[in-house]
Image (cartoon, grey):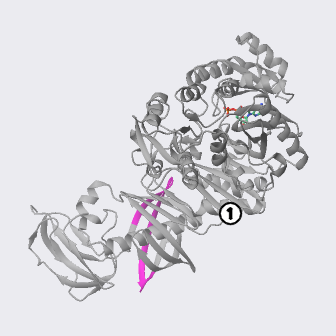
């Protein structure tokens, strides 16, 4: 036994935070490492000690094995957990740890190496008597040989990079004419991404499911499986929703797939946590595709249905402890489903997005919901690392309940400032066919139009109403310089206040009228809503819109207002109504930003004023607001009298420019 007292986590984001959480629970001290981009990241603050690695690029930080081992030595860490990605499946790194007497939490370097190449994996699986997808994994890598094998496998064929991962270097080939381009493209991508251009071919199984088996082996020859995870919902061959149990796996199939995974594990003398991945064809046949020799992103799903802590078990196995259970002791409870929240744009081919997270909020009280997040309010999402922000995992007695819970959680989460797949995920979970358990790996591609359709007029209208009243209230309550008023918030005394806004791709003109008390009439997107403003606090509104009361979270950053309610989120941008010319002309006049009482007039007609000089005091809701000049000028007219009650948008004072 080699007890672990201090553990270095060679990773970042949600997985680093998650590993630290378990360490804390079992009394293991933690060391985080970080790059220049992560100085204030949550994982850095979560750990007991932290060591800086280098510049922001992965190469100079989380992939810099020399620096990481130095950091472990400096802090006297006994072990390193590398999470997933980065160095987690790097056999040389595992060896380098062993050489300096640091425990690498994972399988042996030999097992990592053997499974690092898909070609080798296919051979081992076949030797262990586990079916692999019909295909070709030979040494002759010439285009001629690959073409010939494609023809004998029969279309469609999937080309894979032997060293591949993360769906990179994969191409589906459906006809003879596509063969050469696909081979060359896959080879180039494989060389570029993995430094190894070796390719293998597999029959592409249409409408298959991705079903994988979690395995766990100790150093004493015990090896069990922890059931399956169904990860069929993928975009670009990458998972975004995972669940367990699989709706397509019954007890008999589970036992067979579990046994197949265990026999591969045994063939590898596998220790620690690993995942054996299979393709489950529509006809019920399953085929081995690869082994991942690390903790998977989707491991929480297994944790929730088994009640086990996989990181704790990984640590105990690395310490040399035997598994605390046998296969027969293991059982599952209920259903768990995970959604991966990515900074990416589903409406733009799921390309990664960057930005700053201005709001990050989830209401409390969602029972059976787990959130593994690596971000928080203020996190900057850059280009150096994987764009996964967080995972939401719901556990319930049945699949339907788990899906409902996860869908509700996704809708309730307010994450603003970065484009994410949040709305897309919520739609996916609400999709009827998925609900019926009929998903497969091309499900998203086949339902893309429906899933990326973000039309929601009710959400649009409610968000616009909230935005209008938010601005109305914030201008009114800030001790505003005139300059706080946007040029589009205008001054025609005979018109209601209005704003020109952008919502998604559409322009939306919003106007409103103060009816009485806290009642407003707001017109947006060709409909007029009766709105009552019950509460206003910075960043928070409670509104009744046409009889339904809701809370709104509002985050204003520059011209952008992020609006979140139980209906969902919208980003609203203020547009100048009248481009520059008009704006300049209008700066000289001042309108009332709110309904109020003219408490005091501080200037007289003809008086010269400078920008920022107080002109008039308005009073509303027991608050005084000083109205100030936005520009230098001469008071031209005063349109109101002291004691007069004015509506929002009423013209108060006009200024003439000094030279006129
Ligand atoms: P990577 O290591 O890049 O993740 P995998 O071999 O694990 O590559 O495959 C990724 C995904 O590609 C699978 O989850 C599955 O959706 C799809 N896939 C892989 N092999 C096949 C196949 N033979 N037929 C159909 N789909 C496949």
Residue furthest bottom as drawn: 643
List x then y, in percent, for residue 50.
42, 44
Residue at the disc numbered 1: 405
List x then y, in percent, for residue 553.
48, 67
Residue 146: quadrant of the picture: top right
List x then y, in percent, for residue 305.
74, 55
Q: Which residues are magenta?
A: 499-519
What is the quadrant of the C terminus in the image? bottom left
Q: How many marks?
A: 1
Quarter containing ligand 1? top right
- Considering depth in this image, is 103 or 226 the residue closer to the camera? 103
In screen coordinates, is 364 left or right of 121? left
- Considering depth in this image, is 193 or 652 the residue closer to the camera? 193
Instruction: Check if residue 444 falls in the magenta segment.
Output: no
What is the quadrant of the N terminus in the image? top right
For the question of whether residue 454 can be seen, the reply is no
């Amino acid at each position: 036994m080699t007890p672990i007292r201090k553990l270095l986590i060679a990773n970042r984001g949600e997985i680093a935070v998650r590993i630290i959480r378990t360490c804390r629970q079992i009394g293991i001290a933690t060391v985080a490492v970080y790059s220049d981009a992560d100085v204030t990241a949550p994982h850095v603050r979560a750990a007991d000690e932290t060591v800086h690695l280098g510049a922001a690029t992965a190469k100079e930080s989380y992939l810099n094995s020399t620096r990481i081992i130095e950091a472990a030595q400096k802090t006297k860490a006994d072990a390193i957990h590398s999470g997933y990605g980065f160095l987690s499946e790097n056999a040389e790194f595992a060896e380098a740890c062993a050489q300096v007497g640091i425990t690498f939490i994972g399988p042996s370097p030999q097992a990592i190496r053997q499974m690092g190449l898909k070609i080798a994996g296919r051979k081992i699986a076949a030797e262990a008597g586990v079916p692999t997808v019909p295909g070709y994994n030979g040494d002759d890598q010439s285009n001629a040989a690959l073409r010939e094998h494609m023809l004998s496998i029969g279309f469609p064929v999937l080309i894979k990079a032997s060293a591949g991962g993360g769906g990179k270097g994969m191409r589906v080939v459906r006809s003879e004419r596509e063969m050469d381009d696909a081979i060359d493209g896959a080879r180039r991508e494989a060389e570029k991404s993995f430094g190894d251009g070796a390719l293998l071919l597999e029959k592409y199984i249409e409408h298959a499911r991705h079903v994988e088996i979690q395995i766990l082996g100790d150093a004493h020859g015990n090896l069990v499986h922890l059931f399956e995870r169904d990860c069929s919902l993928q975009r670009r061959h990458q998972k975004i929703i995972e669940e367990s149990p699989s709706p397509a796996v019954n007890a008999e199939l589970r036992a067979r797939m579990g046994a197949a995974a265990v026999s591969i594990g045994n063939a590898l003398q596998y220790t620690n946590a690993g995942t054996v991945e299979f393709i489950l064809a529509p006809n019920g046949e399953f085929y081995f595709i690869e082994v991942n020799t690390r903790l998977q992103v989707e491991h929480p799903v297994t944790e929730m249905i088994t009640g086990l802590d996989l990181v704790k078990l990984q640590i105990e196995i690395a310490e040399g402890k035997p598994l605390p259970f046998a296969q027969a002791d293991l059982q599952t409870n209920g259903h768990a489903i995970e959604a991966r929240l990515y900074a990416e744009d589903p409406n733009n081919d799921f390309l990664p997005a960057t930005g700053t997270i201005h709001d990050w909020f989830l209401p409390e009280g969602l029972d059976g919901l787990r959130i593994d997040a690596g971000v928080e309010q203020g996190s900057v999402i850059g280009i150096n690392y994987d764009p996964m922000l967080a995972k939401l995992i719901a556990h319930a007695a049945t699949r339907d309940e788990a899906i409902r819970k996860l869908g509700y959680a996704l809708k309730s989460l307010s994450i603003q400032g970065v484009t994410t797949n949040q709305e897309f995920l919520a739609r996916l979970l609400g999709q009827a066919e998925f609900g019926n358990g009929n998903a497969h790996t091309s499900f998203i591609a086949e339902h893309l139009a429906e899933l990326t359709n973000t039309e929601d007029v009710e959400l649009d209208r409610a968000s616009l109403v909230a935005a209008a009243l938010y601005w109305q209230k914030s201008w009114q309550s800030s001790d505003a310089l005139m300059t706080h008023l946007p040029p589009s918030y205008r001054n025609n005394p005979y018109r209601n206040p209005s704003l020109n806004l952008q919502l998604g791709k559409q322009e939306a003109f919003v106007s409103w009228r103060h009816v009485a008390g806290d009642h407003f009439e707001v017109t947006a997107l060709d409909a007029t809503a009766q709105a009552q403003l019950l509460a206003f606090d910075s960043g928070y509104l409670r509104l009744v819109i046409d009889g339904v009361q809701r809370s709104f979270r509002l985050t204003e950053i520059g011209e952008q207002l992020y609006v979140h309610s139980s209906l969902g989120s919208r980003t609203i941008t203020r547009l100048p109504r009248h481009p520059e010319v008009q704006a300049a002309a209008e700066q000289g006049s001042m309108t009332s930003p709110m309904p109020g009482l003219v408490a005091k007039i501080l200037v007289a007609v003809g008086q010269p004023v400078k920008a920022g000089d107080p002109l008039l005091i308005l009073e509303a809701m027991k608050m005084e607001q000083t109205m100030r000049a936005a520009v230098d000028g001469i008071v031209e007219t005063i349109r109101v009298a002291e004691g007069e009650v004015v509506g929002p948008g009423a013209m108060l004072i006009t200024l003439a420019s000094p030279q006129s």
